[in-house]
Structures are given as structure tokens and as C-alpha cells.
Amino acid sequence: MQHDRDDAAASMEAGIERWQTAPDLPATHYIDNRIHVDPEIFAEERERIFAAGWKLACHESELPEPGSFRTLEVAGVGLIVLRGRDGGIRTFFNACPHRGAQLLREERGTLKNRIQCFYHLWSFDLEGNCTGITRPDGYGKVGLGKEDVCLRPVRTEVLFGLVFISLNDRIEPLEDFLGPMVESMRPHLDGDELEVFHYHRAEIRTNWKLWVDNNSEQYHEYLHVLNRKTGMTHPSYHERRWRLNPNSHNVISQGTIAYGGMGLDARTSNLMPGMNPDGMVVMLLFPDVMINVRATVMRLDTITPLEPGRTVVEWRGLGLKSDSPEVRDERIRHHNQVWGPAGRNLPEDIEAVESQWRNMASGAHRWSIFAREEELRPQDDANLRAFYLEWGRRVGRAAHDPAIAFHEEAEIAVAAAE
Ligand code: FES
Ligand SMILES: [Fe+2]
């Protein structure tokens, strides 16, 4: 009996030790989940990734005419994206230059020809110029006039219809940031004009990076019965390869999905640009954009982190602007068969990432493993390793141990030795 008790105590000790030490893996092959829950790290991410980088705001089809606008927040800063009378798309702080009142409250809408601040009724045109100051003579003595003030502009670039903005006035041009990824996007985005036909957003109880993980990794096909039956069963499934580009913009080559499985419509006509019959492509732009094309329909995801465990995700479905009503109906059906708030995959994904975060926040799960190596086949974790290296480079902390600074050479040497 005594002997049994000693054995049990020893194995308990070994168990405790195992759960209290980092995995015995290369530093690039696991992460410390404190990077998903620590408020200090979250604040650094906002500043060094979201405020310093390019952020997808919307698709240009959501701003169809002069005066069309949408509002959003980037790194906590309220912004207005607005199409001007000249057709150009510009972005401004959603703050009046007089004394800082919020200018627009609606999420989207169409302005006639001006923005008027509700507080002291200063007015601005659609290009951000101040067009009217109430009782202007009161500023006569100090020589302040409407030509001396304007809305504060924000860097804005439109690429293939995608509207990107940045709070960083000195950021590199968008195409430089995306690099070779531009050529991967071109066949799918640079042809027939696209149009958003579906939009929804949800606030989910997880860290923003866990949603990126979920969008990026193909290993969790096992989560979705739908994907197991329509994707992994296809003979060519494991023949595809990830292409990892600088700045962690990653793309997996086009695969074929057996849409006929599980009662889905086959997808062989009215294909989206660059798509094969029954094809599927996933493109990921650092830090938070996923472009997922399934033969006849495109999905665009983007994220707004609110707190370490609160994240807004926006989902858009796109078709061709030239769609006939019949073709558009078909695209909407194809979109909703897999995606949309009541599509099958989204609730399953949300349940997974919210349960992960609860265990990370409670301390029940300290380290996550990214150690699959399959020569860049779909279920290789290489794209996730690339993402966390890029995250570390930008935040300045090592993802496997955020208490230590990120040392690029050391991390890359480990990655190269894989
Ligand atoms: S704060 Fe806008 S007019 Fe005064
Ligand atoms: Fe999923």
C-alpha cells in the first residue's frame, strides 16, 4: 500500500512539473497564452499593430455615391470613411476640430453635401474643408477663419476595391506592405467589379488573435462535419501548399471541394474571378483580414479588438456587381449554406475560440502548440508560426515567452533550423 502511495505521489509531482513548464519544443512551435489575456500586451498590440499599421475599413461598393459614409474605430480612435463629390474616398477623425465633439453617430449612411457638428454648428464639406463657422466675427480679433481649420485626414488607399486606412501618417504605401501578396490577390479581385451583398457583425468573447488562428488554420477542419465531408475527403486536399509572404501575408493554393456532399449545391457555373469549378482559396493579410473564396462567392473578414477577451468581427459576402437577380440569389444561397450568422461553420468556430479564451483567461491552459510540420501542406502550422513571428517583431515580445524581448535573429535561426 505504502509503495502504491509513493508511486502516486511521484506521478503527481511529474504531472505538476509538466503543467508548470513550457513545452519541450522549439521556441517558434508554441506560444504562451498570456499574449491573449494580458491587458498590458493588448494595449501594446493596439498601438504597435493596429494604430501603426494598415487596417481594412470596408469595400468601396459600400460607399456607392458622393456622401456615402461609414464610421468605425481603429485602436479606439473614431473615424469617418467618406466618398467625396469627386468620387474619391477619404478618411477623417470623427472629431470636430473646434472642441472635439463627435461628428457622426450612425454606422453608415449618406450625407447630402456636408457634415455639421451638433455642438456649435460648424460645417464641413465632403472633402473635409470647413465651410461655415457660426458667428465668425467673434474670431476676428485673433484672425481665425474657416480656412484655418479642417477635419483631420487619415491615410487612405484603395486596392482592388478594398479600402484600407492607417493612423500612421508615415506608413509605407499599402502595396509595399502587401508585397508579393498583391499578385496572389489580383486574379480574384482585379477584374470584374465586386459588390458587398451581405454584412453582419458580432462581438465575440475571445482574443482577436484566436479568431485569426481560426481563420488561418486548416487543421480544425475536424471541427466542422461539413468540411470533413466536403473538403478533407477530396483526394487532392493534401496536395495544396501554403505560400508564406513577407509581413505574414499568407495564401494557400486553390483546392477543390466536393460541394455535392452534405447536400450543398455544386458550384460549377457563375464562378468568381480566378476560381475553378468547386474551387476554394484562402488569403490572409496581416494582421486581421481573411479573404476566402468558394467558387461562386467571396467572404471578407476583418476584426476590431475591444479588450483582451472582447472582439468585434465583421463579415462581408461579395458577388459581382454585374450579377443578374437570379445569379445574385444563387450566390446568396451559396454564401448562406456555409457562412452567414446562421451558416453552419460560424457558430462552430465561435464556440471553439470562446472556449479557448475562457481556459486561457482562467490559467487552465498556459501554452498552445503550433508544431505541425507537413511541408507547407494545408495542415502544416507554418503559417501560424509566421503570424506569431510577425506579431513578436511588431510588438517587441517573444510569443513563446512575452516576458522576454523579441530577438529576430534568434527566432529566425530557430525557424530556419526546423
Ligand atoms: S465642437 Fe463642433 S462646433 Fe464646437
Ligand atoms: Fe472554421
Image (cartoon, grey):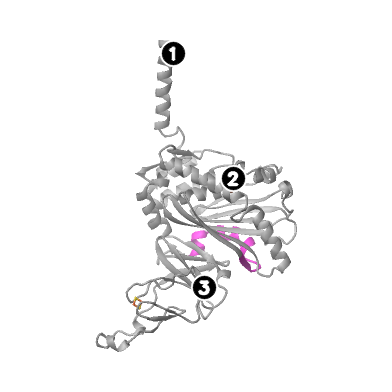
- Amino acid on which the number 3 mark rests in the picture: Gly
Q: In the image, is residue 192 part of the stretch drawn in magenta?
A: yes
- CB of mark 2 near ligand 2 (< 8 Å): no
The stretch of residues the image draws in magenta is 173-196
Q: Name the residue under label 2.
A: 218
Residue to which mark 1 is pinned: 4
* Label of residue 109 in the image: 3
Task: Give me the residue at 69% from left, 68% from top.
Answer: 323
Indicate which disc, 3 or 1, sits on the residue closer to the N terminus.
Answer: 1
Can residue 32 be seen here? The reply is no
The Cα atoms of the two marked residues, 2 and 3, are separated by 37 Å
Q: Nearer the viewer, mark 1 or mark 2?
A: 1
Q: In this view, does 394 lie to the left or right of 211?
A: left
Mark 1 vs ligand 2: CB below 8 Å: no
The quarter of the picture where residue 7 lies is: top left
Q: Which of 172 and 289 is in front in this view?
A: 289
Query: Residue shown at 29%/89% (left/top)?
Result: 137
Q: What element carries label 3?
A: strand
Residue 341 is inside the magenta segment: no
Tell me the SS state at disc 2.
loop
Residue type at numbered disc 2:
Gln
Q: Is mark 1 on a helix, strand or loop?
A: helix
Please determine whether, in this image, residue 121 is positioned above or below residue 283. below
